[in-house]
Image: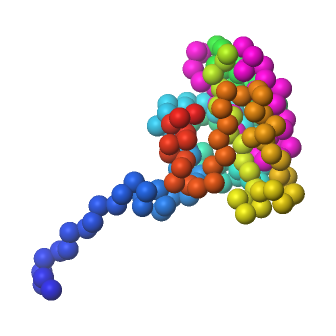
Amino acid sequence: MNKGKPQAKRKQTKTEAARERTGAQCLVAGLERAGVEVIFGYPGGMIIDVFNVLTASPIHFVLPRHEQGAVHMADGYARATGKVGCCLVTSGPGATNTVTGLATAHMDGIPLVCICGQVPTHMIGNDAFQEADITGITRAVTKHNFLVKDVDELPRIVAEA
């Protein structure tokens, strides 16, 4: 035992540091690192934690009247600025309301990232409240889909998206 000498603190790995943060915190941090300045979205139960974290973020949040408005606003933002448009909606009907806007952006080659909430992993495929196979539903109108089941995957997936 070294009396009087402070113990050197072991440096955390990125995975250990990420585990101390919630998925919402990891997602918003990833969006900030990716340079997202504006996000259009409509809150809902399965994504509410992300909205809570956004209140402390420099990312400007725009609230439309409907999820479909969020994706069309993100599309318009991308067309007007040349930057990637970004929208955020909840699971189930919130996510399915984005399909027309996603199709519009996809058909015109507009860069757009749409983040949809989902029911907890253990409830997927069990007909849970507001569950929808949004990955399957949007496969034909998106360039790529991700279904995040592990918070450790978030930094990589946000960077790739």
Q: Is residue 44 left or right of residue 150?
A: right
Q: How many marks?
A: 0
Q: Kindly tell me whether residue 64 is visible in this rendering.
A: no
In the image, 94 versus 102, the foreground residue is: 102
Q: Quadrant of the N terminus?
A: bottom left
Query: On the picture, is 19 further left or further right than 73?
Result: left
Quarter-wise, where is residue 122 in the image?
Answer: bottom right
Q: Residue at x 87, y 57 (%)?
A: 127
The magenta stretch is: 81-108
In the displayed structure image, the side of residue 7 where residue 134 appears, left or right: right
User: Relative to residue 83, is residue 87 drawn left or right?
Assistant: right
Q: Residue 70's spot in the image, x, y percent?
A: 75, 31
* Residue 71 within the magenta-colored segment of the rendering: no
Question: Residue at coordinates 46% horizontally, 37% vertically from top-left?
Answer: 33
Query: Vertical placement of 122 versus 99: above or below?
Result: below
Q: Residue at x 80, y 45 (%)?
A: 133
Q: Between 158 and 49, which is closer to the camera in this rendering?
A: 158
Q: Where does residue 113 sit, x and y in percent of width and height?
A: 65, 31
Q: As displayed, is residue 29 above or below residue 17? A: above
Q: Is residue 106 magenta?
A: yes
* Quadrant, the C terminus: top right
The percent position of residue 27, horizontal first and vertical second, equals 56, 46
> In the rendering, at what x and y percent does residue 123 appear?
77, 61
Q: Is residue 15 visible?
A: yes
